[in-house]
Amino acid sequence: MSDYNIRRATVHDFDGVMDIGDVYMGIDYLRHRFHIFMDDRNIRSYVYIIGKEVGFCSIALIDDGLTFLIRASRVKNGFRGQGVYGRLLKHIYAEYKDVDSIKYDAMTTDNYNCEDKKSLENAYAVMCRKTILSYRFKVEDIDPPLNMTTFPKEVNSSTMTSLFEDEKTRDTLFPEGKIIIDWVPLRLVPSNIKYILAVDTFALQSMGDNSEVSLLSERLSERPLHLVNVECVEKISNPADSFAWIKTAGLKK
């Protein structure tokens, strides 16, 4: 495994990275987000090359640069268990070790990885957890609501900013001070709104009888068959399916 190269990913790596395979059980977002990652100045992506792309990882600086977030990591089948991912992460941490703004190192995982990899508990603390419900349907099979006056309203940047500034509503919806959107744990700061209201995300809000706001965020895939991840933003008492982990960043060691 000595003949390898790690470098920044470019748009020309798209096909090779897609060939690594789906690692999210049929709901992999990378095909739809790859070029967005390439264009985002707060995200750097890396590929591990052994003649071709066999490993990939993206790093996003979120929360005004406070948080170093690992995203979309994967290693091609046949190369797993050989230290590829470890060497890729070591290279990436070295690239970021002099970024003074970073205070936290975060990642998200599902409950299966959480239960299988108890070593996570030794390095990270659980930041928050939530349930993600996935639906597959055809658009033409969806009936329009009969009463549009009670239909949830679309959320735009101005609405989200106002929600963040409303302390009572914000603390009710986000008691942990964070929201997980598309597997990304985000602090409630204006710079994160572009990730909450991403180009392929449709967010809705509704008012309850007590005038409290509910929020749903949906990520739409390609038409006409949609895969929608409905991310219910509310405090839940039972263990959820998505876990966000965080630790104090050790990048400067």
Image: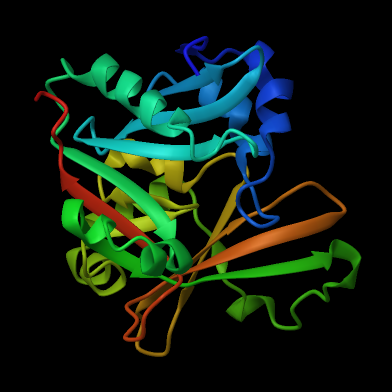
Image spot of residue 225 (x, y percent): 85, 57
Q: Is residue 86 left or right of residue 172?
A: right
Position of residue 106 relative to residue 65, above or below, is below
Q: Among all residues in the image, which is located at the extreme right? A: 140
Q: Among all residues in the image, which is located at the extreme left? A: 253
Q: Nearer the viewer, residue 226 or 80?
A: 80
Q: Is residue 147 left or right of residue 102?
A: right
Image spot of residue 86 (x, y percent): 37, 32
Res. 98 in view: yes
Q: Is residue 136 left or right of residue 233?
A: right
Q: Nearer the viewer, residue 239 or 36?
A: 239
Image spot of residue 203 (x, y percent): 54, 57
Res. 194 in view: no
* Quadrant, the C terminus: top left
Which of the colour schemes (rainbow, by chain, secondary structure, one colour) is used? Answer: rainbow
Q: Residue, x 27% and y 24% (percent of image)? A: 93
Q: How many marks?
A: 0
Position of residue 160 relative to residue 4, above or below, is below
- The quarter of the displayed image where residue 35 is located: top right
Q: Residue, x 61% and y 48% (percent of image)? A: 23
Q: Residue, x 38% and y 53% (percent of image)? A: 108
- The quarter of the displayed image where residue 116 is located: bottom left
Position of residue 120 relative to residue 3, above or below, is below
Q: Residue, x 46% and y 72% (percent of image)? A: 131
Q: Among all residues in the image, which is located at the extreme bottom? A: 209
Image spot of residue 34 (x, y percent): 61, 29
Position of residue 216 relative to residue 158, above or below, is below
